[in-house]
Amino acid sequence: MLVEKNVPLQSYNSFGIAARAHTLVRVRSAQGLHALLADQRLGAQPLFVLGGGSNIVLTGDVKPVVLKMEIPGMRLLEETERGWLIEAGAGERWHDLVAWTLQQGWPGLENLALIPGTVGAAPVQNIGAYGVELQDRFHSLVAVDFASGQPFTLDAAQCAFGYRDSVFKHAAPLAAHEGSGLPRGMGLAGRAVITHVRLWLRKDWRPELGYLDLERKRQEEGVAAPTAQQIFDWVCAIRRAKLPDPALIGNAGSFFKNPTVTPEQCQDIIAREPKIVHYPLADGSIKLAAGWLIDACGWKGKTVGRAGVYDKQALVLVNRGTPEDSVTGGEVMTLAKAIQTSVYERFGIRLEPEPVVL
Ligand code: EPU
């Protein structure tokens, strides 16, 4: 177990915010994790799990012990007539897993190409893009309970996936887990860490083209029945055109969740704002495009201090500083609050941040 002190985190968070970890431990195996949790001094302290750092805003130095998850490995666990069961270590880059499965000839993850972050972080916020969410391909995961050091397995229902949500984002127990025998009742936020994720990729694969941008691309290319590789290429092209590459411009992807409203609320807003972008959901509620709301308030391309609103997608806040003089988490949150206030004042809608603010 390698314990490092006073570690710069600037290259470990995709915003590129300069902050330090008082203590950082690299976790490269389940055994390493076990040793850490059994350590009388380290194991007793508050812990913070860091994956790819692509969904966090650091507002200061991190005092909890940072577990930098670096568990490697991608393998086929089982192949049946119906599909492939694959497993990946929490430390693998999500996009590498997507690319690897396609190279093997196993389709299913192509719509989720180029999402930054690690495999272990993917279930935490149930990553999603272009009509597919992690939960649609999820089989199970292995996590380790901080208190007991014991591994346990969760299936999809036990993960309680929602829109950018799971049991790993909640501290309070969820009703879904009552009597399930899982450790101490769940929410698992701050109580466990994911070590491995298993996905089920079906052989009766069909392209998922429901998302407008993808369908447009299909028509432009004149392809009737695209392959998974073609969809992968299109998703990469769409993302590269719309979203900033964190290697060049620091950011944490979408900064706010797309809010949902009742049909009545939506009608009320449409009466005032006929152009509002909205999508009906299966449960009868209506999802509004937060990017549109922010854009409509005139924020696109604006800069406040060293924090900015990306000029091609208003839902993405970016670091307009330099590595030597980077944006602070405080500046990002000041901008975020100003955006929330103006969206609330104009539309009566409260935007909820997506990243974890630390
Ligand atoms: N829009 C504007 N102005 C903007 C941005 C968007 O008018 O500045 C409008 C667009 O015209 C479009 C609508 O808003 O009609 C939706 O925009 P987009 O297709 O870019 O998708 P999104 O809802 O803003 C979501 C996810 C993204 C994901 C894309 C594609 C959330 C919070 N964001 O964005 O996920 O890549 O769909 O599926 O759900 C992320 O979570 O970090 C992320 C990037």
Image (cartoon, rainbow, N blue to C red):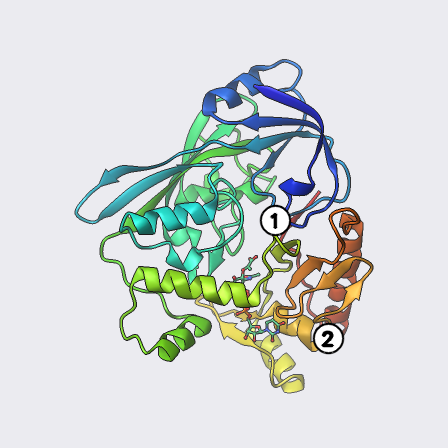
Residue type at numbered disc 1: Asn
- The quadrant of the picture occupied by the N terminus is top right
Residue 52, image quadrant: top right
User: Camera-side residue: 160 or 104?
Assistant: 104
The relative height of residue 347 versus residue 194 in the rendered view (above or below) is below
Tell me which amino acid carries mark 2: Cys
Give the camera-side residue of 223 and 295: 223
Which residue is at a point 57% across and 27% down the rendered structure image?
Answer: 26
Q: Nearer the viewer, residue 46 or 232?
A: 232
Residue beneath label 2, please? 297
Question: Residue 62: x and y, percent?
Answer: 73, 34
SS type, badge 2: loop
Q: Which sits in the foreground, 169 or 104?
A: 104
Q: Determine if residue 345 is in view.
A: yes
Ligand 1 contact, mark 2 (Cβ < 8 Å)? no
Instruction: Indicate the quadrant of ligand 1 in the picture.
Output: bottom right
Please state the horizontal and vertical placement of residue 218, each as a whole percent of the image.
36, 74
In percent of width and height, residue 90 lies at: 47, 36
User: Label for residue 55?
Assistant: 1
**Residue 304 place in picture, x, y as percent:** 81, 62
